[in-house]
Image: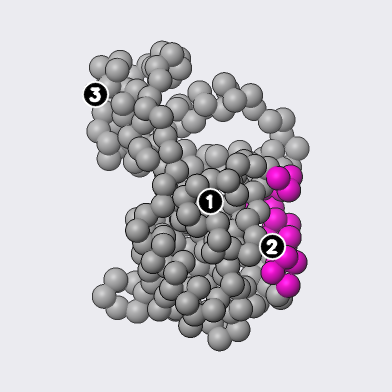
Amino acid sequence: MSAMREDAGDEKAKVSMDVTQIRFVIFDVGQTLLFLTPSSEEVLLARCQQLAIDIELEDLKRGCKMGELWVAQTIMQEQQGTPRMSDEEFDMKWDYVVLETALKDRTVDLDDLVKRLQDVQGPAQNWRTSPETHTVLNGLQAKGMPLGIVSNFSRILPDLCRTEGIADYFDFIIASEAVGISKPDPRILQTALGRAQVNPEEAVYVGDHPFDVLCAKKVPMPVIWFNKDDDPLPDGVTSQPDLQIGALSELLEVIT
């Protein structure tokens, strides 16, 4: 996957989009509608424990946030022509970035630690919905709001959505691998707008990552940032979301 979001008990953000114009809602998937179980930080904790590395889950959560930003920046660099990393190199670099942040106050040979971790397998991960996922999708469907998906994901995404019981909510499901375009390249959202047959100002994109905000604003189109941990926007992301929400269910209050 903020200081701009006001206290939960008050108005949560100033809505700069005209919600009365919204005719289509487009969702991200990972950590927005579907969630990894166990989480990335839980998997890395299990791997570290196998090597008797003393580390706290909260430190790994902080590290994984940095890792998510690194992934997004890496995608941007690849879109600008940087050679794509091998899967092995990518996995090692992910571990390094996460642990560099998680262990920043510790004296540790990070290169050696990351190298040893490559031989350690963690528990298998699966994508799962949350109860809130179905509540929100049911609620939007009841309002007659058409829905779509745009996600940086492999070609299995439509099958995964069917397995998790959410595919039928959506008019289309666009996976980056299938169309050859990844966020934050705005063309992937422009493709979705074409399928939805709406103008940019008539749709809103909902995602959990700062680069979802960046991608939508490059279109430009309205964007709602699902920012459940109240994180600040990272350096380099100057685009502002039209709205921030701390729970997906808040969409039902915004989208009428």
Sooner in the amino-acid sequence: mark 3 or mark 2: 3
Instruction: Answer above or below: position of 114 versus 84.
Output: above
The local secondary structure at tag 3 comes to loop
In this view, the residue farthest toward the bottom is 20
Q: Which residue is mark 3?
A: 54
Sooner in the amino-acid sequence: mark 1 or mark 3: 3
Q: Which residue is mark 1?
A: 161
Whether the residues at callouts 2 and 1 have beta carbons within 8 Å, the answer is: no
The local secondary structure at tag 1 comes to helix
Residue 192 - label: 2
Of marks 1 and 3, the one in the foreground:
1
- Quarter of the image for residue 131 reads bottom left
Q: Measured from the top left, where is residue 85 in percent x and y?
A: 64, 27
Residue at image position (73%, 48%) is 179
- Quarter of the image for residue 12 reads bottom left
Of marks 3 and 2, the one in the foreground:
2
Q: Nearer the viewer, residue 113 or 119?
A: 119
Q: Amino acid at mark 2?
A: Ala
Instruction: Answer above or below: position of 56 versus 255.
Output: above
Q: Measured from the top left, where is residue 1 in percent x and y?
A: 47, 49
Q: Nearer the viewer, residue 72 or 179?
A: 179
The local secondary structure at tag 2 comes to helix
Is residue 224 among the parts visible in the rendering?
yes
Total marks shown come to 3
Whether the residues at callouts 3 and 2 have beta carbons within 8 Å, the answer is: no
Question: Which segment is the magenta one?
Answer: 178-197
Residue at image position (39%, 66%) is 135
Q: Amino acid at mark 3?
A: Asp
What is the distance, in whole Å, between disc 2 and disc 1 at their CAs? 17 Å
Q: Amino acid at mark 1?
A: Cys
Residue at image position (33%, 34%) is 42
